[in-house]
Image (cartoon, helix red, strand yellow):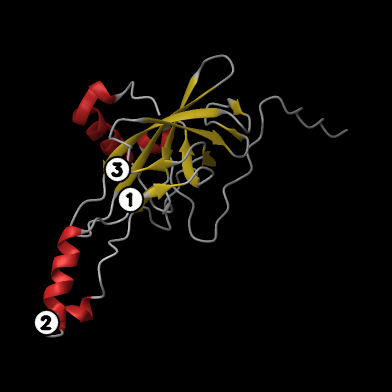
Amino acid sequence: MRTVFRPLGVGFIAVLLAAAGTVPLGAETSGDNRPACVHGLIAVDETIDSSHARSGDVFHYVLVDGVTAPDGTPIPAGTTGYGVVANASHAERGGRGGYLALETRFVVMPNGKHVQVIIDRFNDELSTAVGSSANAPGVLGLLPIVGYAVGGYDSLHHGKDATIPRGTRIGIFVGDDAALGVCRGTRPGESPPPAVSPSSPAPSPSS
């Protein structure tokens, strides 16, 4: 993974997280008349492992299905996108598992245009990963003598690193509308309306 975003540091990551936090889904009500945000699905194009990943590392993904952005721009399936590792922690002694959190940034159109995409945080569970502790079962610590050995083992061994495998699919919102609060997420059981490409022929008027 390249690290071209790393010099921007913690401030850059904070801006990303703040933008993701503005997605206006948590406060939506049944009377919300805003249009549904354009939803898409991406597939991570490389395996990301907390054993060597660092905050600010760049990762790649591809759009699984074609979508149409809110401004009418058709985005074909397979379009490449870029994101950053927002948070990464290596596994450590004491059975502490590794941790990963991803942030998507944009997809790049064939003409070079960037279209913003942000993770659907209210439905996504795969853009973060936590490694297991691999500690001995806690009940063993209650046993005389055995508990001392368990405590020593837990304090010395490493937990397992977190991994987000290549091909992991993550839900996203396409365009600026979600971040600006002018659209809403889909309600439970609701499917987003099908996107109509601007190149589709208009229906002929009835005679």
**Callout 1 secondary element:** loop
**Callout 2 secondary element:** loop
Q: Amino acid at mark 2?
A: Ile
Q: Amino acid at mark 3?
A: Gly
Where in the figure is residue 186, as x and y percent of width and height? 49, 51
- Proximity of marks 1 and 2: CB atoms separated by less than 8 Å: no
Mark 2 or mark 3, which is nearer the start of the sequence?
Answer: 3
- Name the one closer to the observer, 151 or 70: 151
Residue annotated with mark 1? 161
Of badges 3 and 2, the one in the foreground is: 2
Question: Residue placed at 52% from the left, 31% from the top?
Answer: 70
Where in the figure is residue 106, as x and y percent of width and height? 45, 28
User: Could you say which quadrant of the image residue 205 lies in?
Assistant: top right
Q: Is residue 205 left or right of residue 70?
A: right
Residue 83 visible in rendering: yes
- Name the one closer to the observer, 196 or 202: 196
Of badges 1 and 2, the one in the foreground is: 2
Residue annotated with mark 2? 145
- Name the one closer to the observer, 103 or 87: 87
Residue annotated with mark 3? 21
Distance Cα–Cα, label 1 vs label 3:
27 Å
Mark 2 or mark 1, which is nearer the start of the sequence?
Answer: 2
Distance Cα–Cα, label 1 vs label 2:
30 Å
Q: Quadrant of the N terminus?
A: top left
Distance Cα–Cα, label 3 vs label 2:
49 Å
Q: Quadrant of the C terminus?
A: top right
